[in-house]
Image: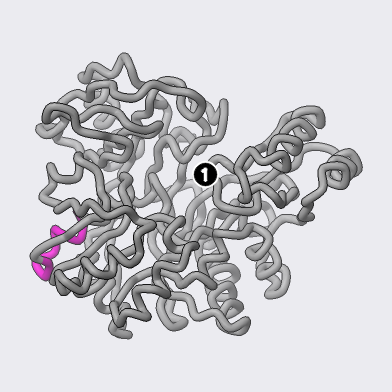
């Protein structure tokens, strides 16, 4: 098979590499990809993810068997609808289904309608009304831009004053149209985890759970980011909690979407929190997480190309995992991320690394990789325990000259308790 992956980050690097490892696959193209991917034999296609017609022309000319859409932006913009109209096979939700990520309000209304456990909330588009609600409810609360904000649209203020200031920024256009409306929701206490599933025509194939580290500094402090690292499995989340999440959240969500007229295909990502009352939904995404993808696909022993082909062909598939190991990934970011940061910083040569490396924010200058974004690359290692996996990855990182970069030194710390 010849396959196409749409996107340019570490998630798409991991998906492309996993697909190319299949004996069923001869070529994997990534559009637009990034220069670091070519180290793994992935073929870069200079077409931007927003250029739907260009991507369709490429897929038809190259006789692509099917396409995997990585990021949320093209999904919300309806790339799946456009591919399907052209008669092309594609794995991802259509525009209507992608609202589950594209609008926090849509997702919340869906959950209320179908009795899927989540926190209480209200939606506002006027600052005075939002401020009055915050003053009435008191802290803690969570503020969310309704639309897409590249993982930065969630704010957890520590004081009422911070909350009011953040609401002014959000409704004042901090994220453009994405924060024209703001969801204010209950702060739920518990341990977070990510539960992803492949979905097609009502069938659900859950993946192992992972735990992402959103805050920029050790001990989960500092600003929220797109993710500073992840690991799987997550030993402190009980098997019963995961099973409840599948039965009380994943299945009712897909059934609820179907009942409302939405036929979901692709990846459903449930960002969950384990509470004393069972799992509750923090957010839904319409695609794989980053950096969860990088550790999940290292942990997966199944042939990803075979799995997705089987799912699209309405066949029963079984997904298998490396139950002997923990996989743990540490994101290396530009200094200053998620606020202002420099670009163009030379990267160490990682081609001989014994750990898996997935690139995201990189460019190429004079044949060498340089930083081009906030999150630059993730390194994934493994061990029989979280502690062993940490030792492997941090020993490898400590041997590199990363003075101009930043990474957390405690990924996986909650699993050690």
The scheme the figure's colours follow is one colour
Q: Nearer the viewer, residue 117 or 176?
A: 176
Please, which residue is most extreme toward the top here? 403
Residue at 28%, 21% in the rendered image: 345
- Residue 237, placed above or below residue 410: below
- Residue 52, placed above or below residue 34: below
Query: Where in the figure is residue 208, as x and y percent of width and height?
Result: 39, 58
Element class at badge 1: loop
Instruction: Identify residue for label 1.
Output: 151
Q: Is residue 322 left or right of residue 128?
A: left
- Residue 129, placed above or below residue 361: below
Residue 157 at least partly seen: yes
Query: Where in the figure is residue 137, as x and y percent of width and height?
Result: 87, 44
Residue at 39%, 49% in the rendered image: 292
The magenta region covers 17-25
Q: Nearer the viewer, residue 375 or 325?
A: 375
Residue 152 is inside the magenta segment: no
Residue at 20%, 74% in the rendered image: 60
């Amino acid at each position: 098979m010849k396959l196409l992956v749409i996107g340019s980050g570490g998630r798409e690097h991991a998906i492309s590499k996993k697909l190319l490892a299949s004996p069923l696959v001869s070529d994997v193209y990534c559009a637009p990809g990034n220069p670091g991917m070519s180290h793994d034999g992935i073929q870069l296609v200079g077409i931007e993810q927003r250029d739907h017609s260009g991507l369709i022309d490429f897929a038809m000319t190259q006789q692509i068997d099917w396409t995997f859409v990585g990021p949320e932006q093209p999904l919300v913009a309806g790339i799946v609808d456009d591919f399907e109209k052209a008669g092309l096979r594609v794995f991802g939700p259509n525009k209507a289904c992608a609202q589950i990520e594209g609008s926090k309000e849509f997702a919340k209304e869906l959950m209320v309608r179908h009795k899927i456990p989540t926190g209480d909330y209200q939606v506002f588009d006027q600052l005075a009304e939002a401020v009055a609600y915050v003053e009435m409810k008191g802290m803690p609360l969570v503020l969310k831009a309704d639309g897409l904000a590249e993982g930065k649209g969630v704010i957890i203020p520590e004081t009422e004053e911070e909350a009011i200031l953040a609401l002014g920024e959000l409704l004042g256009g901090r994220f453009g149209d994405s924060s024209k409306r703001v969801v204010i929701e209950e702060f739920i206490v518990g341990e977070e985890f990510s539960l992803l599933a492949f979905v097609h025509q009502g069938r659900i194939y859950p993946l192992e759970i992972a735990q992402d580290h959103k805050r920029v500094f050790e001990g989960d402090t500092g600003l929220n980011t797109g993710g500073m690292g992840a690991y799987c499995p997550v030993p402190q989340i009980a098997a019963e909690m995961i099973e409840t999440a599948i039965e009380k959240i994943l299945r009712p969500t897909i059934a609820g979407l179907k009942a409302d007229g939405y036929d979901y295909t692709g990846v459903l990502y449930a960002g969950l929190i384990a509470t004393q009352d069972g799992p509750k939904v923090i957010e839904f995404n319409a695609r794989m997480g980053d950096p969860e993808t990088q550790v999940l696909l290292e942990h997966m022993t199944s042939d990803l190309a075979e799995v997705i082909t089987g799912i699209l062909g309405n066949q029963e598939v079984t997904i298998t995992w490396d139950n002997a190991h923990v996989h743990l990934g540490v994101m290396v970011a530009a200094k200053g991320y998620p606020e202002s940061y420099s670009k163009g910083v030379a990267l160490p040569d990682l081609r001989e690394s014994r750990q898996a490396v997935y690139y995201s924010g990189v460019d190429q200058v004079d044949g060498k990789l340089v930083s081009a974004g906030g999150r630059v690359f993730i390194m994934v290692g493994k061990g029989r325990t979280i502690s062993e996996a940490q030792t492997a990855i941090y020993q490898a990182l400590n041997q590199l000259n990363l003075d101009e970069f930043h990474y957390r030194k405690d990924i996986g710390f909650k699993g050690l308790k």
